[in-house]
Amino acid sequence: MDVSENFTQITALICEPSRAKILWYLLDGSGYTASELAAFANLSITSASNHLSKLLEAGLLKVEHQGRYRYYSFSNAEVAYVIEALAQLAQLKNKRKTIQSVSTGMKRCRTCYDHLAGTVSIQLVEAMQKKNYLKMEDKQYSVTKKGWDWLLQFNIKQSEYENIRRPLTRQCLDWSERRSHLAGQLGADLLKAMLQRKWFRKVQFSREMIVTAKGRKEIGDLFGVTVS
């Protein structure tokens, strides 16, 4: 199969309405059962299972077994980037009005697969650039010596990234802000550290996150920005 045929098949899989809903739901980086995804997409279990089988066969999803349950999630970060990029088109089409289906909270702070997105993420990245921790280069960010020293407080060490397969950083265009937030392995590890510090509280059954009082104070102290 040549590239054009493969592209046609993949785009057809992603853009079918029911599968698109399933893929959107998986953007929070968690694994879900077929019944959970069926409920979200308003499908029968049988129909959802058929869609999931096609996505698995195409390599877009992976499945993990835990006891009698099967949990579906993205096969890799690249799939998440594609789904997030498609959201850019949805925003562009509606650039003169607010997307009614997306809450203010989601736009403010949410997960994008395994890293932070939304207004808060943009504030943090811009603060890191102003403080010379990050520098924008092409489609990624470079971490400065000052940045690596600063990241040690999150137990993030430069030496641990020497042989990673995944890109260290990546500029992921934020569909609600139209500016780039931090993705890649560093983006994932930084969000993990922030969650361990209890800076954010996840909203159940949603990608939205709420900034805690502790988070607001420590973000203000470490980044020099005020978040709501």
Image: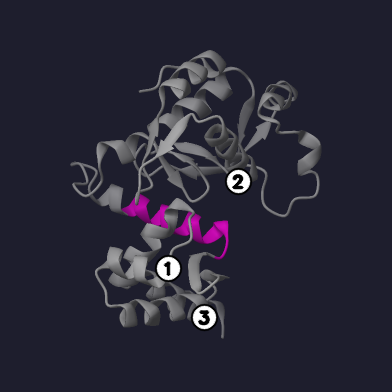
Q: Disc 2 designates what residue?
A: 184
Amino acid type at mark 1:
Thr
Task: Determine if the magenta segment contains residue 33.
Answer: no
Which disc number belongs to residue 188? none
Residue furthest front as drawn: 67
Residue at image coords 49%, 71%: 69
Q: Position of residue 205 (x, y in %)?
A: 34, 52
Q: Disc 3 designates what residue?
A: 57
Asked whether the beta carbons under mark 3 and mark 2 sit within 8 Å of each other, the answer is: no
Between marks 1 and 3 in the image, the one whose residue lies nearer the viewer:
1
Q: Say which quadrant the N terminus sits in.
A: bottom right
Q: Is 79 left, or right, of 87 in this rendering? A: right
Residue at image coords 39%, 72%: 34
Task: Determine if the magenta segment contains residue 83.
Answer: yes
Q: CA distance from mark 1 to mark 3?
A: 17 Å
Magenta stretch in the rendered image: 75-89
Between marks 2 and 1 in the image, the one whose residue lies nearer the viewer:
1
Q: Rate crowding at label 2 as few (under 14), some (14 to 19) or many (20 or more) other CA atoms within 10 Å.
A: many
Q: Is residue 148 visible?
A: yes
Q: Is 16 left, or right, of 77 in this rendering? A: left
| SS for callout 3 | helix
Q: Position of residue 74 (x, y in %)?
A: 51, 63
Q: Say which quadrant the C terminus sits in.
A: top left
| SS for callout 1 | loop
Residue furthest bottom as drawn: 1
Q: Quadrant of residue 51?
A: bottom left
User: As displayed, is residue 71 above or below residue 97?
Assistant: below
Q: Position of residue 150 (x, y in %)?
A: 68, 22
Residue at image coords 40%, 29%: 211
Q: Disc 1 designates what residue?
A: 33
